[in-house]
Image: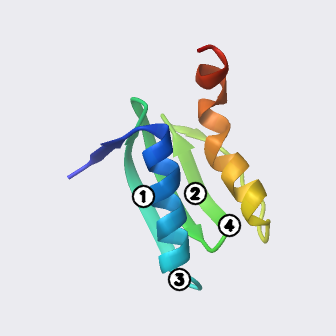
Amino acid sequence: MIMSYSAEEFYKHITAERKNHKAKWFFFVGYVENKYIEIKGFNTWIQIFKVDGITYPCPMEINVKEFNEILKRPFLNEELGK
């Protein structure tokens, strides 16, 4: 079943996945703010990050702050417009 999340729920879910799967791959497929998201990550590296079919790049070995900024990037325009 594909889940639907608010942006805040999504950030919390991915943070929990990252922390609960240290040194293991984690995955996410679902809708966030009506956008279809696909993620495959390992620690703070997001190998695959697609939003509505658009790939967002993520460098390897970044710190948690940078990781969180990358997760929020697809939603910034909508948040700024509110």
Q: CA distance from mark 4 to mark 3?
A: 11 Å
Q: Secondary structure at mark 2?
A: strand
In the rendered structure, which amino acid carries the disc numbered 2? Ile
Q: Secondary structure at mark 1?
A: strand
Q: Which mark is residue 24?
A: 3
* Horizontal relation, residue 48 to residue 63: left or right: left
Q: How many dots with numbers?
A: 4
Residue on which the image places disc 2: 48
In percent of the image, x 57 and y 83: which residue is there? Answer: 22
Earlier-in-chain disc, 4 versus 1: 1
Q: Residues within 10 Å of mark 1 (few under 14, many from 20)?
A: some
Q: Is residue 23 above or below residue 64?
A: below
**Is there a contact, CB below 8 Å, between mark 4 and mark 2?**
no
In percent of the image, x 20 and y 52: which residue is there? Answer: 1
Residue on which the image places disc 4: 45
* Horizontal relation, residue 40 to residue 1: left or right: right
Residue on which the image places disc 1: 28
Q: CA distance from mark 3 to mark 2?
A: 15 Å
Q: CA distance from mark 1 to mark 2?
A: 10 Å
In the rendered structure, which amino acid carries the disc numbered 4? Trp
In percent of the image, x 79 and y 66: which residue is there? Answer: 63
Q: Secondary structure at mark 4?
A: strand
